[in-house]
Amino acid sequence: METDKPLLAIRNLSYFYGDIQALFRVNLTVCEGQIVSVVGPNGSGKTTLMKAVAGLLRPVLGEIRYQGERIQDLPVHKVVRRGLVYVPEGMKTFPLMSVMENLEVGAYISRQQKEGRLDFVFNLFPVLADKRLQLAKNLSGGQKRMLILARGIMSGARLLMLDDPFLGLAPKDINRLCNTLRQIRSHGYTLFLAGQHVRRILSVATRAYLLEEGRITLSGSGDQLRDHPHLQESLYGIVAEAG
């Protein structure tokens, strides 16, 4: 269930690629049980934001707190051990390993609860249970995306960060993935999404942010952002008529 308790709190986060500033004092909160989406034009800093939170970009300016703990100086493996798991854009399965072996790789840092999580992901994704002995390369595109999500859950994720989760999927698989994300949330997981499929990402969001040139320029519910004139103009070039 969604609460007003912050699970992830980003305060005045800035990041530089050399002399080029990519993020400008970004403030953003992800509360327990939410699906929070970040949208914006290409090059707006969405992936940079995700990587900074996940520990892949260091050093950063500002503060990142996860479950109340400052994590902006932690390396990636320590961030993951705390239950914050990043699934990057284009992340792939291990094609020559079976579905089961892929899931076991996900559990390598959190083996104590492996069996319980395995039962959970097989209930969530019955097709993976049916295909557990098949090589990952033989799965469909939608099934591979399910496997990637399941692998994240196997790692002990409490907060799943997904960068462009709909990338490369057929429309029917996008619809299924939207339903899957809602289902994952209903089981107590928190989701933090970013990507180019703006309408889809906003359709599942309980909270959303517009990021432009490294700055948060709008925030609200997914529906509020989707229908906001500024977002329409920024992303689609649609200018609202006066009057």
Image: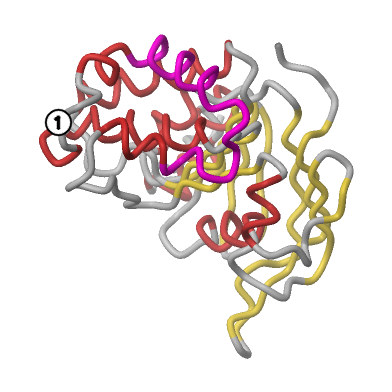
Depicted 198 relative to depicted 32: above or below: below
Relative side of 190 to 39, left or right:
right
Query: What residue is shown at x 45% (from left), y 32% (from top)?
Result: 201
| Magenta stretch bounds | 105-125
Determine if the magenta segment contains residue 117. Answer: yes
Q: Amino acid at mark 1?
A: Ser
Residue 225's quadrant in the figure? Answer: top right
Determine if the magenta segment contains residue 12. Answer: no
Relative side of 32 to 159, left or right:
right
Depicted 50 relative to depicted 114: above or below: below
At mark 1, the secondary structure is loop
Expressed as whole percent of the image width and height from the top left, the position of residue 68 reads 89, 42
Quadrant including the C terminus: top right
Magenta: main secondary structure equals helix
Depicted 2 relative to depicted 159: above or below: above
Q: Nearer the viewer, residue 182 or 157?
A: 157
Q: Nearer the viewer, residue 184 or 131?
A: 131
Query: What residue is shown at x 63% (from left), y 60% (from top)?
Result: 76
Q: Residue furthest bottom?
A: 19
Residue holding disc 1: 140
Query: What residue is shown at x 60% (from left), y 35% (from top)?
Result: 157
Expressed as whole percent of the image width and height from the top left, the position of residue 138 reads 10, 35
Relative side of 107 to 83, left or right:
left
